[in-house]
Image (tube, rainbow, N blue to C red):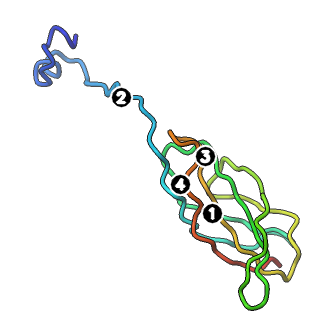
Amino acid sequence: MQTESANDMAKLLSSGFNAVNMNRAQSPLDTPLIVEIVNGISGQLVVKVKPVKNAKSYEVRVAVVAPGGATGPWQDAGDFTDSRQMIVEGLTPGTNYAVQVRAIGGSTGYSGWSDPSSHMSM
């Protein structure tokens, strides 16, 4: 129908057909924004991020925050498909952790890491 309408959108729409975007190009992912970190059961943190368009999943990492604010080395905390409930387990109760999240997917494979957010595991 596109060739018969001579690429005229008005002609196409008047024919009863709908226009469809054929652009399937992937785009770079936005950097996730951590919305909330709450305690789950003892030794767990539940992380929630604002969903990122075209993200297939999310990667989470944590680091111990020492007294004085120094952050220890980052450790992988898992990959998750639900941006609203990423449960990080195996944490030490009473320890403060920095958390970062990045999205996986899009044209670049990964987004940048989110700004770190801190929360104490209970």
Mark 4 surroundings: few (<14), some (14-19) or many (≥20) residues within 10 A: some
Q: Is residue 9 left or right of residue 56?
A: left
Q: Position of residue 21 (x, y in %)?
A: 32, 28
Give the total number of marks visible in the rendering.
4
Q: Evaluate if marks 3 and 4 touch, with contact meaning CB atoms under 8 Å apart.
A: no
Mark 3 surroundings: few (<14), some (14-19) or many (≥20) residues within 10 A: many
N-term-proximal mark, 3 vs 4: 4
Q: CA distance from mark 2 to mark 3?
A: 21 Å
Q: Residue at x 59, y 60 (%)?
A: 113
Q: Tell me the residue that label 1 is attached to.
A: 48
Mark on residue 103?
none
Question: Which secondary structure, mark 3?
Answer: strand
N-term-proximal mark, 3 vs 1: 1
Mark on residue 104?
3
Q: Amino acid at mark 2?
A: Asn
Residue that sits furthest to the bottom in the current view: 68
Q: Quadrant of residue 36?
A: bottom right
Q: Is residue 30 left or right of residue 21?
A: right
Q: Name the front one of labels 3 and 1.
A: 3
Q: Amino acid at mark 4?
A: Pro
Q: Evaluate if marks 2 and 1 touch, with contact meaning CB atoms under 8 Å apart.
A: no
N-term-proximal mark, 2 vs 1: 2
Q: Tell me the residue that label 4 is attached to.
A: 51
Q: CA distance from mark 4 to mark 2?
A: 22 Å
Q: Residue at x 68, y 65 (%)?
A: 47
Q: Nearer the viewer, residue 19 or 62?
A: 62
User: Which quadrant: the C terminus?
Assistant: bottom right
Q: Tell me the residue that label 2 is attached to.
A: 23
Q: Amino acid at mark 1?
A: Lys
